[in-house]
Amino acid sequence: MRARGDAELEALWHEWHRHVLAYALRRADPATAEDVVAETFAIAWRRLAEIPERPLPWLLGVARRVLANHRRGERRRRALVDRLPVPAASEDAPEGHVLSALASLRERDREALLLHAWEGLDHSEAGTVMGCSAATFAVRLHRARRRFERELARIDTAAEVAR
C-alpha cells in the first residue's frame, strides 16, 4: 500500500518536473540537468511537509542550490590535479598520469590525499573523517604523498620508455 506522501510526491512530479527540468537545462548539460531534477525531487520527498502551496518557486530554489553544489563539485574536481603534490621532476606530466597515479593508490592513501587537497581539510578535520587523531592523519598523509610521488614517477618513466 502506498503512503499518502508517495501520492503527493507523484502528483508534484507529474505537475512540476517539466518546469524544473527546463530550468536545469537552461543552466546545465542534459545529463547534469537530469541529475538536478532527480536530486530536487529527492529533497522534495524528504521535505514534503515544508513545500508551500505554490511549489514551483520552492522547487526551483532547491534546483538552484543543487546546481550550485554540482558546480562547486566540478570546480573541486578540476582543481584536484592542480592541488595534488606533484614532484618537481614530473611537473610536465600529463593530467592523465596524475589521475592514474592517484587511482593506483590504496583507498586509504587516496582518501588522505583527497581529504587534504580536494576537500581542504586540516589534519584534525581529516583525522576525524578517517577515524584517527590529527597526528596519525599527518603520518598517513606524509606516507600517501610519498607513495603517490613514487607511483607518478613510475608512470612517467614508463611513458618516457614508451615514446
Image (tube, rainbow, N blue to C red):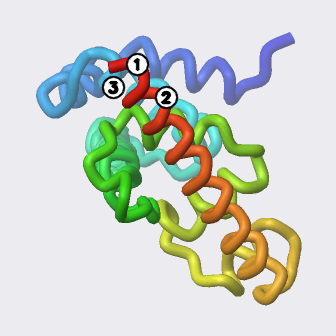
Res 162 label: 1
Q: What element carries label 2?
A: helix
* Along the viewing direction, whichever of 131 and 163 lies nearer the viewer: 163
Q: Is mark 1 on a helix, strand or loop?
A: helix
Residue 105 lies, in percent from the top left, at 69, 44
Res 32 label: 3
Q: Are marks 2 and 3 in contact (CB under 8 Å)?
A: no
| Quadrant of the frame with the N terminus | top right
Neighbour class for label 2 at 10 Å: few (<14), some, many (≥20)? few
Residue in the image at 37% along x and 51% along y: 81
In the image, which is nearer the foreground, mark 2 or mark 3? 2
Specify the quadrant of the image occupied by residue 14.
Answer: top left
Q: Is mark 3 on a helix, strand or loop?
A: helix
Res 158 label: 2
* Along the viewing direction, whichever of 52 and 82 lies nearer the viewer: 82
Q: Do the residues labelled 1 and 3 touch (CB within 8 Å)?
A: no
Specify the quadrant of the image occupied by residue 24.
Answer: top left
Residue 44 lies, in percent from the top left, at 53, 38
* Along the viewing direction, whichever of 86 and 43 lies nearer the viewer: 86
Res 43 label: none
Residue in the image at 43% along x and 62% along y: 87
Q: Which is nearer the N-term, disc 2 or disc 3?
A: 3
